[in-house]
Image (cartoon, rainbow, N blue to C red):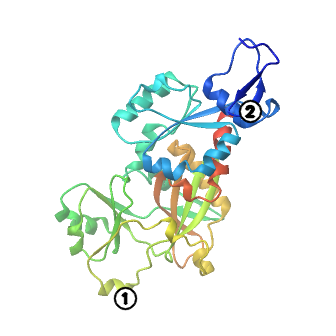
Amino acid sequence: MRMRGENVNVVGYEREVEEEELEEEMEMEMVGALGSPQQQMKLVVVGYALTSKKTKSFLQPKLVGLARNKGILFVAIDQSRPLSDQGPFDIVLHKLSGSKWSRILEDYRQTHPHVAVLDPPDAIQHVYNRQYMLEDVADLNLSDSYGKVGVPRQLVIEKDPSSISDAVDKAGLSLPLVAKPLVAKSHELSLAYDMVSLQKLEPPLVLQEFINHGGVLFKVFIVGEAVKVVRRFSLPDVSKRELSKSAGVFHFPRVSCVAQSAEEADLDPCVGELPPRPLLERLARELRRRLGLRLFNLDIIREHGTKDSYYVIDINYFPGYGKMPEYEHIFTDFLLSLMKQK
């Protein structure tokens, strides 16, 4: 036992401790990294369950360092051990798939209601299915003085590619059509130019009408109440002349990525102008409530030739925040705000 006034070295810092008890080892390490006792703050422990690829892209050194300075500690969740035996956690951050993990997390939420789980498994599954992903946007029917937001007309094809042409004809969809996997865990897509080529597609999938948008889309990142938007290059417009002379299905492994940033490009203002901030904030606020999610992004396009006609074409849970400018500050502030809400 150490008496008051004795010096204890914790992670290279000299500290005084009370004689009655020491802090738990993990918190003690963090307190040491935070500086003098006057600078100490309550430790926020974030347990994370992410794939190795997601861990590398998200938990970058700058984020981890900033989080540490703000009193946030990221701790890897051991999937081979019961979740309830780990921690204690203030927040659980996850992006894993599978019914087993969903059950584990749902049970944990029920038995640990004080822990903020980002986000509920059932809400995540909703946006993983493209049949339902955009329903809340369509139901919202957002239209105000800043513009209107809708979704492309689409058709779900669950099986039998030979029936796709008839289904498209009955639904009255216009070519070209964007084909996306029904389960939104792949960013691959195809663009079909003619009816015959539709039979080459592999269900289950969703067909969306392609809307000319000047080859630019807007990625709207949402972190709690924070909204950040960036430009990305997208598929080029398809003219009627090009459509009449083209045939086949063209595959695109990933349309929007960091290498295709349009932030510094010299764009026509009619194409590159960001959507109005009030419109995006209202859309984000409504979708947070309807979807029950706090970590997601929207892929939005502006119909070419219009000033205020927007379409949400995709929703992604826990997207690549490492590509979002200033994500370290935005995300750490968000984590701290969760603690204030308790």
Residue 188 placement: quadrant: bottom left
Q: For the residue carrying disc 1, how many other residues have a C-alpha within 10 Å: few (<14), some (14-19), or many (20+)?
A: few
In this figure, which residue is indicated by the disc labeled 1?
A: 241
Image location of residue 81, percent across then percent down: 41, 27
Residue 269 placement: quadrant: bottom right
Image location of residue 110, percent across then percent down: 48, 24
Q: Is residue 111 left or right of residue 221?
A: left
**Amino acid marked by disc 2:** Tyr
**Amino acid marked by disc 1:** Arg
In this figure, which residue is indicated by the disc labeled 2?
A: 13
Image location of residue 319, percent across then percent down: 50, 53
Give me the C-alpha separation between circle 2 and circle 1: 71 Å
Residue 140 seen from this side: no
Which quarter of the rendered picture does the C terminus lie within? top right
Q: For the residue carrying disc 2, how many other residues have a C-alpha within 10 Å: few (<14), some (14-19), or many (20+)?
A: some
Q: Nearer the viewer, residue 56 or 172?
A: 56
Q: Residue at x 51, y 55 (%)?
A: 320
Residue 2 seen from this side: yes
Q: Is residue 237 above or below residue 315?
A: below
Give the foreground label among 2 and 1.
Answer: 2
